[in-house]
Image: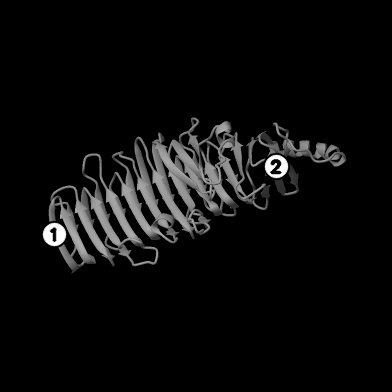
Amino acid sequence: MSKHTHAKTKTLSLKPLAAMIPMLVFAAPIGAVETGHVAAGSGTINTQGATTTINQQSDRMIVNWNNFDIRAGEMVQFNQPSTSSAVLNRVNSANPTQIDGALNANGRVFVVNPNGVVVGKTGSIRANGVVLSTLDVANNTFMAMTPSSNGYAYANFHSTGATSGAVVNEGVISSGAGGVSLFGAQVINGAAGSIYAKGVQTALGNGVAAINLVAADSVDVIANGSSGSYIVNQTGAGSATLTSIANDGVIRNDYGLVNMTVESRSNASLRNTGLIEAHGSSRENGGISLRNKSTGGSSSTSVGGSLDGESVIVYANNNTTIDGLIKGGTISAEVSGANSNATLLIADNAQLSVEDRPSNWNPSFLQLIGDKVVVNGQVSSSGTAEVRSYNPDGVSIRKGGLNAPTWTINDGGTITTGKGSY
């Protein structure tokens, strides 16, 4: 795993001793293979050839690493007490962590490096839950983040000084109900990247998985005690010169939510050119949410590609262009700038379609709201549709661009209603 030859030499010199004594369980920092040591909790670390195995004995454990790079052909395997167990891998390196091999766990695995985490095209991470972050969390907070069976546990992940670290995925990240969360000043699922999650449908509806891509300085993470999934609240605006979040690959959640959120004190961009799918038994457990909360003059939001969810929400404080295909049980897009001059543009090749779905427990609806709303593409709803501008003369819809059984156009207080094609 590590590229430091001195670490491998040290390991070889210890093997004769290790062969003469039973394997020990460590509850304090140790001189572990490949420069890792257990800082909290208990477990053992062992390397045999290209495989590093971490046997975790405590429900939660923290391992500090000087280097956590996993080269192509190498594998890191975490064996944890249960699927809800968690391990925090904190990387103390001036360089981003590069994962080109395999990282596997039966529970939840966290990798924190303020300078970035990159999953390469040959890299893969498979676990019940995955968190890759440039934001750190206090040891005592992480170790105490064990919710009761019906309760919740909270933790704050925050910047420790680095403001430009990126979390990038060009490989495959796959999780169970624990979901996938990527935190950083820049968060990118590249064109070759795939992120998958699959929750567990239960009678109480509490097995929802979440995929969270968040660009922020501070993030509150809420662990659901009954499912192990994470609910994320962004609490701090990014301080990087340019904060960005993008999906150019594939994001798919078979039973749960997909959230992309970005905020900056200056400028920020949100982009989708890839595929996002989220499905479930209702809007609450099968939704897609894209939010760009930044107000910088050069901030932008671009929603292309393909989105398909039980509900789809696009929210921005800046000019927003939708030029892809969006399908859902409900669709809501809203933009509002600091100076009431943000435009929501439904571009010529855009298609927004609200469909009747078994998951709909309320009538289907389509909402397009903004300081200015321009519809050059095609929007349709099997239920109701509303196009609303906060400003007079702020709505522009091409002929035939809107179709719904009932629709309402609110142009800065001037209201028009109708049926069928507009």
Q: Which residue is located at x 21 percent, y 43 percent?
A: 340
Within the image, what quadrant is residue 93 found in? top right
Residue 180 visible in image: yes
Disc 2: which residue: 57
Disc 1: which residue: 416
Instruction: Judge the density around disc 1: few (<14), some (14-19), many (≥20) Cα neighbours within 10 Å.
Output: few
| Above or below, 69 relative to 200 | above
| Residue 277 horizontal side relative to residue 380, left or right | right
Q: Which residue is located at x 27 percent, y 62 percent?
A: 348
Q: Residue 219 in the image: x percent, y percent?
A: 45, 38
**SS for dot 2:** loop
Q: Residue furthest right?
A: 20
In the picture, which quadrant includes the N terminus? top right
Q: Residue 124 in the image: x percent, y percent?
A: 59, 53
Q: Which residue is located at x 53 percent, y 58 percent?
A: 200
Q: Residue 353 in the image: x percent, y percent?
A: 31, 64
Q: Residue furthest left?
A: 414
